[in-house]
Image (cartoon, rainbow, N blue to C red):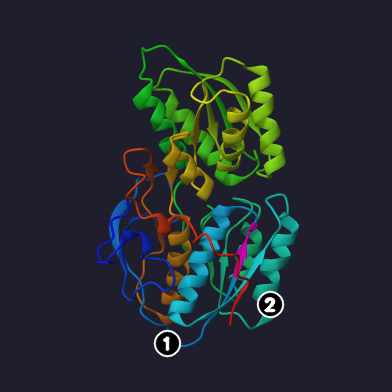
Amino acid sequence: MIKISIICGAALVCLAGSASAGETWTVDQWSPSYDFSNNPKETTYSSMEKASKDWNLCVVFPHLKDPYWVATNFGVVDQARKLGVRADIFESGGYPNLDKQIEQVKHCAAAGTYDAILLGTVSYDLMTPTVVEAAKSIPVFATVNQIQGDGLSGMVAVNWVDMGRAAGRYFVEQHPAGSTPAKVAWIPGPETAGWVKFTDKGFREVIKDAAVDLVTVKYGDTGNDIQKTLVEDTLDEFPDVEYIAGNAVAIEAAMAIVRQRGLTGKVKLVADYFTPAIYRGVRRGVIVSAPTDSAALQGVLSVDQAVRFLEGTSTADHIGPVIFNVDTTNVQDFPVAESLAPSEFTPVFSVP
């Protein structure tokens, strides 16, 4: 779990509204940077109190159609306001829209009004030529999604292989090797998305050490209708399945479908990332486990990293929150506001 080294009064409101000056977190740091082949080391990261000038940031996200990216949007907006910097937030409309994101990054690099680009990439490798070209005129920072390191000035991202490992660890603990295999369906998300490839790798790696019968793997875009269909097809094709594990949109859909089909308690759910609905599901005991990579905190750290770079203050090139599982043992007391936006928050596209 992320260990907050300041006294906040109440952990759940440390990020709500304006964060207090000089917040400090224990985060993971990778060395060499942008290389997830090595295990990270924990380090202390302290946020800035105020920027020295009103830097203007261009922020490009894959989309803002799910609570995960809304939480990251909240973190970006919260920290930009706290530091007194400006930001324009663009969204590319979804992971299939590579061409649109390329044009957005090119626009920000050529506009002459931005000091840095924060990029939540739609592709691990296909955005690299655009990043390299943009970096000739403006620093580029990777936010949340992994991307090749060429052209980057910094990155705030966790290893999504570790997110998959965290999701799979539930099965190692609950269904150890040698016990009766649990029948598991795995629905990780869009097959071409970098984060899915990494999550898939980590999940499959860890469940090798568990008693798991992986009965099916279904890929698809994280639109609600698509994920709902994948869940329904899974239950139709494998009526004896005991677990559905996968992306948060699939698991959110599965909560309702399992209830409607009278399968509550018979089909258990494991998510591989964290959203408000997943949080509610864990609180109710419908979802048995879900890892969080603290999406809102990643937005905070990314803005802070970029501004530190612009002002020439020392900062690590590649950091990310410490991943941990949320389950019935800690769901009542972990720092929710580092993972989720406040319920009343709606996406913000400009911080003047």
Q: Position of residue 202 (x, y in %)?
A: 46, 35
Mark 1 or mark 2: name the one nearer the start of the chain.
1
Q: Is residue 251 above or below residue 149?
A: above
Local crowd at mark 1 within 10 Å, few (<14), some, or many (≥20)? few
Q: Which residue is mark 2?
A: 110
Stretch of the chain drawn in magenta = 59-64
Q: Give the residue drawn at x 59%, y 50%.
A: 124
122 sits to left or right of 269: right
Looking at the image, which is closer to me, 337 or 259?
Answer: 259
Local crowd at mark 2 within 10 Å, few (<14), some, or many (≥20)? few
Q: Which residue is mark 1?
A: 52
* Image quarter in which the C terminus is found: bottom right
Looking at the image, which is closer to me, 332 or 163?
Answer: 332
Question: Which residue type does callout 1 highlight?
Answer: Ser
- Residue 294 appears in which quarter of the rendering? bottom left
Question: Which residue type does callout 2 highlight?
Answer: Ala
